[in-house]
Image (cartoon, helix red, strand yellow):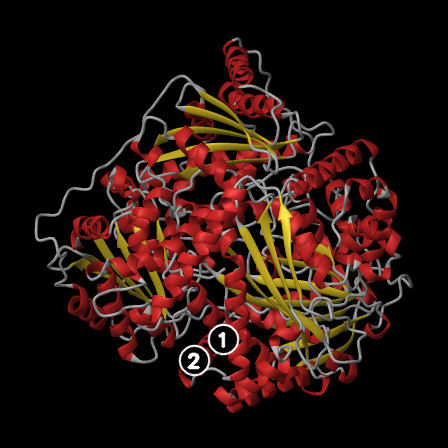
Amino acid sequence: MAPTVFHTLEGVDISGDRFTSPLPLGPEGISHGTLENGMKYYVRKCAKPKERVAVGLAVKIGSVVEEDNEQGVAHMVEHLAFNATENYNNHRIVKFLESIGAEFGACQNAYTSADETVYQLVVPSDKPQLLSDTLAVLAEFAFKIRCAPGDISKERGAVLEEWRMSRDAAGRAQEAHWQLIMQGSRYADRLPIGKESVIRGVAPEVVRAFYERWYRPQHMAVVVVGDVADTADVVQLIQQHLGTGRSRDTGPPPAIPRFTLSQHEVPRCKVMVDKEAQDSTVFVSFKHPRSKTTTPAEFLEHLLDLLFEVALAGRLFKLSRLVDPPFVMASAAEEPLTSTIQSFVLTAVALEGCTLRALETLLTEVARVRLHGFTKREIERALREMRAEIENTFLERDQGYCWDIRDEYLRHFLNDEFVTGQEYEARLSKTLLSLITKEGVDARAAAYHPSCSCVVKVVEHKRHCTDEEVRAVVDKVVALEAQGGIPPWEEGEVPDCLLPEARLPPPGAVVSERTYSVLGATELMLSNGMRVCFKPTTFMGDEVLTSGVAFGGLTEAPEDLFFTVSMAGLIAGQLGLFGFKPSVLNDVLAGKRVELDIAEGAYTRILKGVQSPQDLEEALQLMHLLFTTNVEVDSKELEVVMAMVRQGIEAQLRNPLHHYHSRVREINYGGCYYFKTITLEALEKVDPHIACAHHNMNYRNPAEFTLVLTGNLTREELVPLLLKYLASIPPVGLPPPKKPSQLVALPFTFPPEPVVVDVNVPMVSPITQAQITFPVTLRRAVAREELVWLGLGCRLLETRLLQRLRFQYGEIYTVAVSPFFGCEAPSNTGDPRGDVSISFTCDPRNRTKLAEMALEEVQALQEVGPSQEEVDTVVNLERLQYENSQEENNYWHDLLVMGYQSKSFQQSGDLEQVYLKNQEARNKVLGEISPHTMRDSMQRLFPFPCRSRYTAIAMVPEPLPLLYRMVSALGSAVQAVRVALTPLLGPPAYDTTDMDMDRGMHDEGVALSPRLNPSPSGRHTGEALPSPGRPGSIMRTGSSSMRRSASGRYAAGGYGAADSSSSTRLMLLLAGAAATAAAVAAYRSWRAARGSSGSSGASSS
């Protein structure tokens, strides 16, 4: 794609009154209006995905309108919507929706925030009746939730478990921060999750009265976006099902109160100490009224805010890369808090004991901008980032997914965000960008003075400073600024390009070529031995996925050097890959959508990224530099890196989940060294010089690597770049390419007998994480089919468990069933081995009963099998997922990458044959599936009987007090009575959730994609990648109209940022201070959803 897309965009006329007039709702073809009962509606066509429709019901009611005795009721109502309505009970609404192909997940189908409750579904549109039935379900949510005593009793346990999940260190910090920042406002005491006492004891009549008082059509909007034939027909369906709906309360609808910002000139300063806190973190928030984006003038203000954030975050990143940095990570971002309040938040993760210095630096840099402004170079870099985003918006203007577009209209209704369509937005953005000046960006700093409703919070695991010392730092910076004692910012020199022409060797050549017509892919063998496969697609206009894989990973190193070599990617990334220091590379790549990460797993090394087509040349330059430059050890920088690593290890030791997951891996994998986490003692033995040498050898010989590119590319543009940058990499003899048959296998074993263990862990808030794991062995000759059977079986089991543990017993929030084959070596010639785990969290006193129920369901599927209805639902969901995947770059890209690693390809050399055999296996299983064959597969794949070999490992608080054990016994008795009474209330419905199967295998028993994270995934053990994040907004809020930088480089600075990628495994072990920008972004999204108490009647992990 030409690099001048931005310059070719036509502008928008914003002259005269147009500049301050509301932008028209768009694009052309949108149907919107108001029904006779006052409900708003939006209907728009969207072809992606094919035959899918996203629907949403927004209610402008959240927790802030609750009375004292109702705290948590808005969220409870959201849960009840999926539990029981006038026409559905016992969660049958979930069963119906899943039977037609709607999928469910935690925080995926509904959420409750302080100001709103939103229900969201994605359903097929291939049968006209399905949309009508779905709108009828929305009508049930809007007007017919039952709120009967039995319904509420069933849902209390799930809501309580969701509340319990929010009581970890991050959740506690969030709640305290929320109350501090909202002090003086009603929002401070209206968290969406509510109060435990209300959740346990609220009367049904209180819940019903809240629902009937506030759920009024005048407060609602319905949105339908998707592959529909005629929007007018959809509007008629909306009118039919929702147009005459009314609340049971016949009185006039109450006005929705608005609670505004409580401003203050004196900064609020607070130091929080939580012994489980993972980082020493500083948060500086500047509150202000939430701005609207309804006119070009308002959108211009929004763009100025974004440019200020990008420029400031870039400066903070440079500071984090100093030899003696004030912090190891920092970010700057605008954050919506409520419908009336937002804040600008500065966040920094500091080395332990250095939080005051980090705070002083954050405040000083904003003051420096007030005094001297940004440099011209900083502004130009920020503008380049913005232009890249505008180009991305335009290039993918017709490729948005129906659920993303639906959410835009939901935000239009809830927050008055304009929606014009991506093409118009890109043109408008270009027009407004021409009005932006450096002075306009600099002026944003005036709103972020400590006298502007500033809140400063420090979170530490032990006290290193006091509230008074924090306040003294704030006063010090204010005084320095008043005296003009802060000098201007000084910048170093930045290279003009990544790779000067003079440094390039002569281009290489293509020595052979092969076409895979069925796959639509072309394979080239380059003169230096590197294999390249590319597949052009038109799915996304601004995306090219790249992956390079070589056999040979961490198992090739001596065991006594394991921690040293496993840290190679982390250390190299911090010192500087590609021949550049990270801060310099950040500047060179400003405005480029170029991402290239490296990682080393058990059996492979990988480089992976996503690029804009117009920036593909820079991505290939980085690959050339990766192979032709060495990482050198800088002693001063290394000292900072190792201090950061040490702090990360210490942080993990404070995390209750760390101790639990370590024990899970020790038991399930026989104490295999690969799954042991690094200790402080082991860190002392790490040799960074050997680590860097290991990294340099990992990416030296191009003949070891196969590179796959998938996306919007053409042969004519790609091949010359491949010859110039990749084929020109000098061929070397070392290290020689590894054959899969030569790889050293991990020495892992699963216990031969059942193991039931409680792992006693000290923790502040009692919660149990439970995992039940079964060994799985696939028959080599039919491993392809067995993998399909296993995927369907895991989905079916998850359905059953959610039905029993969530809907019938009512004591969990979600459950996950996940297969794992990441230990399986490509050199294995026997039957492939893996495992399947069942994971959930619960009240500690319920763990034994819930684990027993899980085993009973596995046993029932093995002995009796599923019903035909269950089989039909699972097959339908698999079909819909498969159809969606056909239009995804990721699907085809992963298929090619995994195909090259398969044993079939090593034997035949034919990638197309691998694909066709896998398709044949899938079709064969789907043709044979029935209750009988599904039962047989559960017997064949799992230990049979299931109780003959498994592990059940639970994390429990240490110690359990005598009083708690007495209450636990009483609680178990009460639950037994509740379960016994369940038949009197009618059979429960059930839910199936999307199981993202991490196969690690792709065909007949060969590990095709040994995991980048070689330890079991977070889904497998419950361990997610920790990150510093920030407890800013704990309310669910929509994203801004103008998307932020795709690169993510400015989202977080410092060691471990996205430009200094490292092994995913090490980031898992050390992630406290070494969080990547991507992890921070994921953390924000997850915390926003979790803090808003988002849930559905059927949620999953």
Q: Residue at x 89, y 57 (%)?
A: 558
- Horizontal side of 114 relative to 740 (left or right) equals left
- Horizontal side of 9 relative to 154 (left or right) equals right
Q: Which residue is mark 2?
A: 870
Mark toward the start of the polypeptide (1 vs 2): 1
Question: Which label is found at residue 1083?
Answer: none
* Residue 72 visible, this orientation: no
Within 10 Å of the Cα at label 2, are there few (<14), some (14-19), or many (20+) other Cα atoms?
many
* Residue 1095 visible, this orientation: yes
- Residue in the foreground of this view, choosing between 225 and 17: 225
- Horizontal side of 868 relative to 511 (left or right) equals left
Classify 905 as above or below 340.
Answer: below
Q: Residue at x 76, y 67 (%)?
A: 749
Classify 987 as above or below 607.
Answer: below
Quarter residue 1034 falls in:
top left
Label 2 secondary element: helix
Residue 518 place in picture, x, y as percent:
60, 84
The N terminus lies in which quarter of the figure?
bottom right
